[in-house]
């Protein structure tokens, strides 16, 4: 279907949709002649896409300003978070068709034509630049230095504990849940995830457990109350630490669990019997993986167990810095194949014993978070502002698509430090034990 500009005869030469239609039809890429969505412009004119297609709304010429200045994800992100670009209807339907535009490359002449069309449609694009959103991150200093890592982590987490509570729910767990069956509540699935991790680590009363990137302390709470371990959690966010300590006091396990505002590289009081890292190593960086694994090995006793739960890249290459995720969600975050952390573990005398993919579990988790945000959107905006709420809405929807498409995934990798017996069972069923009727899990043998 060719794009149709909906306008009156007198408007056809001047409305924004007509100008856009003529410009797109002159481009060599057929996907741009008939995009799988409808575009509604600020003057009320519309470019109709395929039948029953979702609607992208350009609510202000500022959207064009952003895209002309940064014709990439950054321009789109700035337009989205400011509300200059919006979606009427299901955001995921728009994101689902993004791959139809892969491989499109515009020549300098094509870009010049689009610029000229933008000038005709919105002469104001040459006036004062549209402001960069306040929440856009521009980290300084050496990448993955202690100071820069603290700054970028706090950019994401030192926002509002109440905001995270709206999205994450009572579990306050910001990582992939473990669903069985898929209709589980978010809270039940997060409890199951905590239990799975504790069972894989074969936790026992009195053992020392280090949680690297402990967040709001949920896993440590479960480990202390259910297994009687003595836990240390390190986290870079002061706000997370404050709430984690309060939750620990309220649970009556302050004698068992300590929360430190510290980088994992600053921990010196090993050895620990077990170490866990959930949703943290994505911040470590590819160049730092060997150092990360070596630090874990240094802090872990011989025969001790380490579980690394984190997102990995499956299909695409590592993107550059000018991405929505890097500027608005996880500055300096890096995803890479799971084999890279496994190689780093092997080089640090950490023997990989078990690997489990949870890819299908993350879209289920994300959509429950999205539903929570939708149900509390006004309250979320009051807490953190409209720009951040919009950034989160896009980030979660795009992430759900990425996991479903097999672009990214999430793994739990269990390793044992060489040098002593690890006492792991011979098979995975025994690793978790017989079926547990409430959690659909396993219970240890008596």
Image (tube, helix red, strand yellow):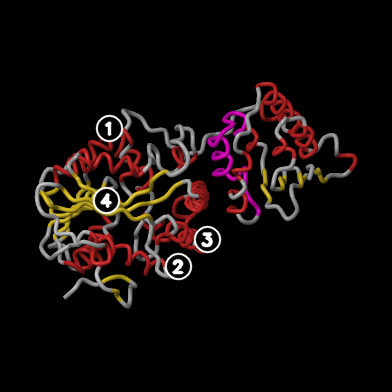
- Determine whether label 2 and label 3 are within 8 Å by CB: no
Please name the predominant secondary structure of the magenta segment in the image: helix
Q: Which residue, given by chain and number where applicable, does mark 3 sit on?
A: 374
Q: Which mark is residue 182?
A: 2
Q: Quadrant of residue 358?
A: bottom left
Mark 2–mark 1 distance (CA, rounded to whole Å): 40 Å
Classify 396 as above or below 429.
above
Q: Which mark is residue 277?
A: 4
Q: Is residue 193 magenta?
A: no
Classify 432 as above or below 212.
below
Q: Which mark is residue 275?
A: none
Q: Is residue 234 visible?
A: yes
Classify 119 as above or below 389.
above
Number of labels in the image equals 4
- Which percent across, then down, holds residue 429? 27, 66
Mark 4–mark 2 distance (CA, rounded to whole Å): 25 Å
Pick whichever of labels 2 and 3 is earlier in the sequence: 2
Q: Which residue, given by chain and number where applicable, does mark 1 sit on?
A: 145
Pick whichever of labels 4 and 2 is earlier in the sequence: 2
For the record, the magenta segment spans: 66-88
> What is the secondary structure assignment of the residue under circle 3?
helix
Residue visible at 77% across and 30% down?
26
């Amino acid at each position: 279907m060719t794009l149709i500009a909906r306008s009156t005869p007198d408007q056809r030469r001047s409305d924004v949709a007509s100008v856009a239609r003529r410009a797109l039809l002159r481009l060599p890429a057929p996907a741009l002649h008939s995009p799988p969505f409808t575009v509604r412009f600020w003057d009320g004119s519309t470019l109709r896409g395929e039948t029953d297609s979702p609607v992208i709304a350009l609510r202000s010429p500022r959207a064009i300003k952003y895209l002309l200045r940064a014709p990439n994800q950054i321009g789109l992100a700035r337009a989205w978070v400011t509300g200059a670009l919006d979606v009427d209807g299901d955001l995921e339907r728009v994101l689902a068709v993004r791959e139809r535009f892969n491989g499109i490359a515009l020549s300098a002449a094509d870009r010049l034509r689009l610029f000229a069309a933008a000038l005709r449609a919105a002469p104001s694009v040459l006036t004062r630049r549209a402001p960069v959103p306040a929440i856009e991150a521009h980290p300084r200093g050496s990448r993955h230095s202690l100071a820069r890592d603290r700054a970028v982590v706090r950019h994401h987490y030192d926002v509002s504990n109440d905001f995270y509570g709206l999205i994450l729910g009572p579990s306050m767990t910001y990582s992939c849940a473990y669903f069985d069956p898929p209709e589980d509540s978010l809270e039940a699935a997060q409890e199951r995830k905590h239990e799975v991790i504790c069972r894989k680590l074969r936790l026992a009363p009195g053992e020392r457990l280090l949680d690297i990137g402990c967040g709001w302390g949920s896993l440590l709470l479960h480990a202390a109350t259910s297994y009687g371990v003595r836990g240390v959690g390190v986290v870079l966010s002061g706000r997370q630490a404050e709430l984690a300590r309060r939750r620990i006091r309220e649970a009556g396990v302050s004698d068992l669990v300590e929360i430190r505002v510290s980088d994992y590289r600053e921990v010196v009081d090993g050895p620990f019997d077990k170490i866990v890292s959930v949703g943290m190593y994505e911040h470590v960086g590819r160049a730092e993986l060997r150092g990360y694994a070596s630090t874990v090995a240094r802090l872990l006793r011989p025969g001790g167990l380490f579980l690394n739960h984190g997102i990995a890249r499956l299909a695409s290459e590592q993107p550059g810095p000018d991405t929505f995720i890097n500027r608005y969600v996880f500055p300096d975050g890096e995803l890479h194949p799971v084999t890279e952390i496994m190689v780093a573990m092997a080089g640090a005398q950490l023997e990989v014993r078990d690997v489990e993919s949870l890819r299908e579990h993350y879209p289920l988790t994300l959509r429950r978070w999205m539903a929570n945000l939708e149900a509390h959107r006004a309250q979320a905006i009051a807490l953190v502002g409209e720009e951040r709420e919009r950034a989160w809405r896009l980030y979660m929807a795009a992430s759900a698509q990425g996991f479903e498409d097999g672009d990214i995934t999430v793994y739990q990798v269990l390793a044992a430090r060489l040098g002593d017996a690890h006492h792991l069972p011979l098979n995975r069923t025994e690793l978790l034990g017989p079926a547990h009727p409430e959690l659909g899990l396993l219970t240890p043998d008596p």
